[in-house]
Amino acid sequence: MVYVKMNKPTSNDVARLAGVSQSAVSMILNNKPNVSFSPETIGRVYTAARQLNYRTKKQQKVPMGTTDPFIAVVSPTMANPYYSTLVQSIENEAARESYGVLVCDTYHDPHTENRYLSLLSTSALHGIIYTFMPFHWEKVKTLSLSVPTVVVGDKNQSIDIDTVELNSTEAGELMARHLLDLGHKKMAFISTPLSENNLPRFRRLEGVRNEVRSTGAELIVREADRNLVSDKYNPDLEYKVGYEFAKSLAKDSSITAYIGVNDMVAYGILDALEERNVRVPDAASVCGFDNIFPSRFHRVALTTIDAFHMEKGRDAFELLHRKMTLGEQNSQTSIFRIEYKPTLLTRESTGPCPS
DNA sequence: TACCTTTCATTTAACGGTGG
DNA sequence: CCACCGTTAAATGAAAGGTA
């Protein structure tokens, strides 16, 4: 009679599966800064640990309440419905497959992001979805070797991670084309800080510029000061940026169209214009990006670019789920990209240029 | 239960291969 | 040669198991 004992996995089992020594496993899983290991090795160890359901001693001491696996979603802010809606759609999909979801809000702050990235290096975690382009790209890439990873972001060729993306340049072009077709000759683009770290904002402006350039139209760009954003916990920052800039720009009645870098900024613009007695869309048109859910409400009725929240969330989780269940066999070699074509949603906030 | 044994985990120090 | 990556070996701890 042969007994197949279902022994609890030991660090030795992990070591054998990962093809390294036992002490290496211990050092890697306990984040020892002592010796250095290549990201590939670290990845193999984490993957092996996850496959065997191995827990380090510290993890054994604080057992997780449930045996359900969970994933993390890293998001820059929950104040903007774009992200909260996206996170919810991911949660819905995850729940369908019995995955728990842990949401990490970075407040657009590199330090907060870094703290979370450090927390997330644990073999107990089954996957990570970023709803934006993280600051600490190198760290994210390293982490992606040990944990399945998907990024919901902007088109970026240099990335070698699975992505779900929307072409922001195209979105900007689409929006500008819409306004030009309506006969607008002078328009303003209002944005929160445009940095290399926030590609979508940059690309939206770029798209607008591309389209305006060949025509005789004039484009005024207003960008919030980066220092102004130091108050990172301010939830209505985007709204305020739109509000303040539009309030001063409204003195110039020759500006007949305003583009907010996203819907939240556009809301601020709408309020400022109303305060200045500039009627929308008769005297000026306003539009945004993302199509967050309040934008369809009757009193707002904002013309915007659809961001496909539900679809992106669904696809992001599906990609992740595929990697998680497939194991690592193919995950290293194949990179998936899902791209959505931006779609213009014309509502009541835009109209023909007044004569 | 009290005591001893075994097993596994963690940590440190020192060693060795390898590629620029 | 040196920096990097990983190993071996050994000591210490901590928990689990066995037994009277």
Image (cartoon, coloured by chain):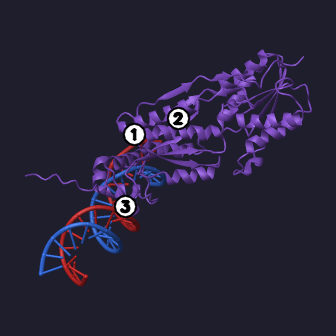
Chain colours: A purple, B red, C blue
Residue linked to disc 3: A60
Residue A328 seen from this side: no
User: In the figure, is residue A287 to the left or right of A142?
Assistant: right
Q: Amino acid at mark 1?
A: Met
Q: Mark 2 near mark 3, Cβ–Cβ under 8 Å?
A: no
Closer to us: mark 2 or mark 3?
2
Assess disc 2: are there few (<14), some (14-19) or many (≥20) residues with their C-alpha within 10 Å of its C-alpha. many
Closer to us: mark 1 or mark 2?
2
- Find the residue positioned furthest to the left: A1
Residue linked to disc 1: A324
The spot of residue A329 in percent (x, y) is 34, 36
Camera-side residue of B11 and A287 = A287
Q: Amino acid at mark 2?
A: Gly
User: Mark 1 to mark 3: distance in Å?
Assistant: 23 Å
The spot of residue A49 in percent (x, y) is 35, 50
Assess disc 3: are there few (<14), some (14-19) or many (≥20) residues with their C-alpha within 10 Å of its C-alpha. few
Between disc 1 and disc 3, whose residue precedes? 3
Residue linked to disc 2: A313
Considering the numbered disc 3 on the image, is that residue within a helix, a strand or a loop? Answer: helix
Circles 1 and 2 on the same chain? yes
The spot of residue A125 in percent (x, y) is 43, 49
User: Mark 1 to mark 2: distance in Å?
Assistant: 16 Å
Considering the numbered disc 2 on the image, is that residue within a helix, a strand or a loop? Answer: helix
Q: Residue at x 75, y 41 (%)?
A: A239
User: In the figure, is residue A332 to the left or right of A111?
Assistant: left
The spot of residue A1 in percent (x, y) is 7, 52
Camera-side residue of A254 and A311 = A311
Between disc 1 and disc 2, whose residue precedes? 2
User: In the figure, is residue A116 to the left or right of B19?
Assistant: right
Mark 3, chain letter? Answer: A
Q: Amino acid at mark 3?
A: Gln
Q: Quadrant of the C terminus of chain A?
A: top right
